[in-house]
Image (cartoon, grey):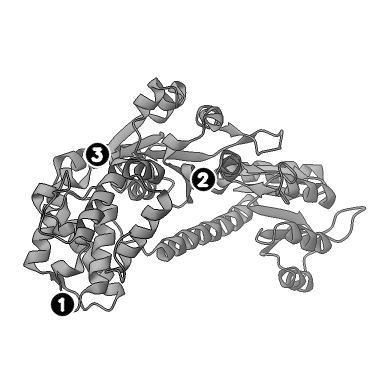
Amino acid sequence: MRILIVDDQRSIRLTTAQAVRAEGHEADTADSGRIALLKLQEERFDLVLLDLRMESESDGLDYLARLQKISPQLPVVICTAHASIETAVEAMRRGAQDYLEKPFTPEQLRQLLARIDKARRLRQRVDELEEQVAQTQPALDFTSEDPEVATVMSVVERAATSRATILILGENGTGKSALARHIHQCSQLATGPFVTVSCPSLSRELLESELFGHVKGAFTGALKDTWGKVDAARGGTLFLDEIGELPAELQPKLLRLLQERAYERVGDTKTRTADVRVIAATNRDLAAAVKGGAFREDLFYRLNVISVTMPPLRARPRDLERHARDFLRFFAEESGGVVKDFSAEAWAAVRRHPWPGNLRELRNSVERAVILARGPAVEVADLPAELAVPAAGRDEVALGALVPLDAIEQAHVRLVTARTATLEEAARVLGIDAATIYRKRKRWAAGPADEPAS
């Protein structure tokens, strides 16, 4: 934890800071409530030890309210030699987390810090679990009968216990994000936060602010100081999803973060230290991007300390049945548990489909099928139409196949979008705009259309 010690007696500040550091925490000090307020505006702390009585200043309880106004969730412990039941009750009533009577022993301080740190980690864990529940994502089982996946997991399990940067490669939908979270949960940082940054989702300016934070007035719309994802991941894992899309202007700053563990917030001059483990993922060929000048070579080598590649689902048929049935059980339980299995015909359609969208496509297809199923078994009619395309039409759409025209269109659009890096690129190949693809996919996901395909 980062702990701010507020006391007007220098000897107490120094001895308390020494005891805090002996427990493995970071310590900063302030000799007055006024200085403490200024430091809270510039830094983020996990705990404040606040002296109740400081000479030539107002009561420490008054500063308690002012500290909480700046950082409402910040735990504050009142420290004072003027201990009484009345002051303890009043401090707790005003929002203090605990009360420590001076002079306190190192053991008393150690127990206090342990309680505060345990509560902080529990809050982080609850937040993480709430996020996972909100996403309603079935957990992926990374045990595998496929030798290639087994090799990947062997490397991952050995690397997880270190703090080395890990680069996860693979096509869209192969489970890279889930693998990153699995690595975090297997690491020594598992009790810390797991924070995701999606590199293609924001403009360069907003992505920089998202990563590193910004100070008030740094740019138009920066109405207050903001702490970025690097700080939010402190003591845990920072997952950079689709790192291949990171703008060139931010690549030197990420390189510095990896090499020196140093960064600055946007609009700030103060250098800060990052206490995070970085995991990155991409569906791009970074080596080719380096040759083409789109990605820095030194950043590539820094990210590529330990690299693993998640094979596509079509390359590991042994895992297909397990994942399909896991998804079916998950979504069946969510919908009331009526659906129990696939029919023989539906299962044959699942097995012969090439799954260009990998696990993501399988998940979405099974979810759709469970929702539409009218009995205890998923039928072919419940599956997306492209699963009915015969084997001859897997790689190239078979003209004249005995399937509805809409099924041919769905299969073709899905294959093209799976083989292109972005929706815009797929739209160029298909000769339509990206919004049209989006509308078609939304209509197909909803089931049979009321009007013909446009």
Q: Inspect the image, locate mark 1, and give the three-letter code of the amino acid beneath it.
A: Pro
**Left or right of residue 193: residue 287:** left
Answer few, some or many: residues within 10 Å of disc 3's Cα (few below 14, many 20 plus, some between 14 and 19): some
Q: Inspect the image, locate mark 3, and give the three-letter code of the amino acid beneath it.
A: Val
Give the residue displayed 23% in from the left and 60% down from the top: 406
Question: Residue 58: which disc?
Answer: none
Q: Which residue is mark 1?
A: 376
Q: Would residue 104 be seen by someone viewing this image from the given angle?
A: no
Which circle, 2 or 1, is nearer the viewer? 1
Q: Would residue 175 be seen by someone viewing this image from the given angle?
A: yes
The part of the image, by quadrant, that contains residue 425 is top left
**First in sequence: mark 2 vs mark 3:** 3
Front residue of 392/87: it is 392
- Distance from the alpha carbon under mark 3 to that under mark 1: 36 Å
**First in sequence: mark 2 vs mark 1:** 2
Percent across and percent down for residue 412 are: 24, 49
**Left or right of residue 375: residue 195:** right
The part of the image, by quadrant, that contains residue 242 is top left
The part of the image, by quadrant, that contains residue 205 is top right
- Distance from the alpha carbon under mark 2 to that under mark 1: 47 Å
Q: Secondary structure at mark 3?
A: helix
Answer few, some or many: residues within 10 Å of disc 2's Cα (few below 14, many 20 plus, some between 14 and 19): many
Q: Inspect the image, locate mark 2, and give the three-letter code of the amino acid beneath it.
A: Gly
Q: Which residue is mark 2?
A: 235
Percent across and percent down for residue 48 are: 70, 54
Q: Secondary structure at mark 2?
A: loop
Percent across and percent down for residue 411 are: 22, 53
Question: Residue 152: which disc?
Answer: 3
- Confirm or deny contact between disc 2 and disc 1 (CB under 8 A): no
Q: Secondary structure at mark 1?
A: loop
**Left or right of residue 113: residue 87:** right
Which circle, 2 or 3, is nearer the viewer? 3
